[in-house]
Amino acid sequence: MTGHCEPAEAEVPEAPGRLLVAEDDEPTRMLLVTVLSRAGYDVLEAEDGREALALIRKHKPDLVISDRMMPEMDGDELCQVVKGDRSLRPIFFIMLSVKASTGDRTAGLDKGADGYLAKPIDRMELVAHVNAGMRIVSLEQELARQIEEERRLRKALQEEQRQLRETLDELHQTQAHLIQSEKMASLGTLAAGVAHEMNNPISFVASNLNTLGEYVEDMMALLRAHERLLAHARTTDDDEAARLAGEIEAVERQMDLSFLLDDLGTLLAESRDGIERVKRIVSDLRNLAHADDEEFTPADLNDYIKSALNMISGQLENKAAVRQAYGDLPQIECCPGRLAQVFMNILLNAAQAIDRDGEITIETTCDTDVVRVRIGDNGTGIRSEDLPKVFDPFFTTKEVGQGTGLGLFISHGIVAKHRGEISVESEAGRGTTVTVTLPVKQGQS
Ligand SMILES: Nc1ncnc2c1ncn2[C@@H]1O[C@H](COP(=O)(O)OP(=O)(O)OP(=O)(O)O)[C@@H](O)[C@H]1O
Ligand SMILES: [Mg+2]
């Protein structure tokens, strides 16, 4: 081994890179392999361009030194294939040739090579060239790593931002939900308080109206007796009696007694009807306040939905078909009578929203620890601006006397006492679906 050709020890790279030597001339190839192995590199070797390409694809070396003139596939073609392939392009490609004029070198570099070495090989120059190439390769690798790392960080950041946005959305929803529950709870308390205060006056007004009705009956009997007296007075010879009878008749005409008597009955009947409606509202609201005083018992909701449906079936006749899909439900802890009232309110609303040829669907399902009841209709639907108000007490779009606007408010209260949820989805002109979700068990406290 000749001393002057040995490469300087200091030039050996820290981490050995993998090189590939493509050379058909065996002595030259041996020389390249020996020098580069000594320089600390891991060296693969190929006898022609095709073999080189197969090894390159398999082992992805950091650097290739390729003879320009080779059988099967020459160095130029090999270089073009390597540089034309996205995954191989980062490989540092050094062309090796006896043709080493400036023109040859330029042509080689133009083909895409990153370096050019002339034959015969100068060992020092070879190692220096390869070391320089490897420095570039490792810088490029470092750069690629950094770009990859940056991309990873950016992706992680985007993912974090997405999660944050999701959390924020969830928070907003929870907040809206809490505000809604708070609102409903305070409205419930307020309504129950008002109902409690109204209960006494309403009761005595109702009772007074009854007494008043009885008094009116008595007065009517008296008036009828008066009429008979008047008729008699008109036919007697007693002038004073006839004059008094005339006076009374004048007063009767002036006050339009016959109309007054007719109207008295109507007014009393309307007042009784009105007071009955107010009594029902007051009693509903008071019942709501005492809903949790009731015993919770295990019950199969399907039975209570069916009986609610029975109760309103009169309102459905010739108007809507009812499609029922009852799932297998476990018994749930509840106040079944109260829940039947909820389903009746929902079913009544559905019936009232349908003019004719409608369809109501009832579906019950069970999910591990909750049961879900869905009642849908293809009726009028609810305008989007009304949707947030449907649970408000006294919100109604129905005519006076048709709806009080308490059905859903009371239903919401009853479902809340069961620690459940009730929600309404609707589209004007298409229909409405009300979903009630109730826990199977009520849990402690
Ligand atoms: N299935 C439905 N289809 C269309 N609108 C509905 C439906 N359910 C509820 N609504 C709307 O919500 C409003 C409130 O319903 P809610 O049951 O509380 O009161 P109501 O039916 O008007 O009166 P009440 O139930 O006290 O007799 C209704 O007036 C109606 O506008
Ligand atoms: Mg209703």
Image (cartoon, rainbow, N blue to C red):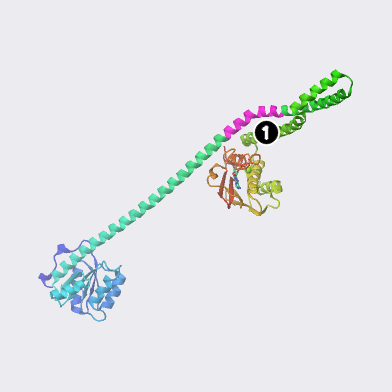
Q: Main secondary structure of the magenta part?
A: helix
Answer yes or no: is residue 8 visible: yes
Residue drawn 28% across the image and 60% down it: 144
Q: Which residue is mark 1?
A: 279
User: Furthest residue to the bottom?
Assistant: 71
Q: Can you say whether 168 is above or below 264 in the image?
A: below
Tell me: 372 left or right of 116.
Answer: right
The x and y percentages for residue 383 are 55, 47
In which image quadrant can residue 141 be found?
Answer: bottom left
In which image quadrant can residue 146 be found?
Answer: bottom left
The x and y percentages for residue 369 are 57, 48
| Front residue (pair 188, 205) | 205
In which image quadrant can residue 152 be found?
Answer: bottom left
The x and y percentages for residue 192 are 60, 32
- Mark 1 belongs to which amino acid? Lys
Residue drawn 59% across the image and 33% down it: 191
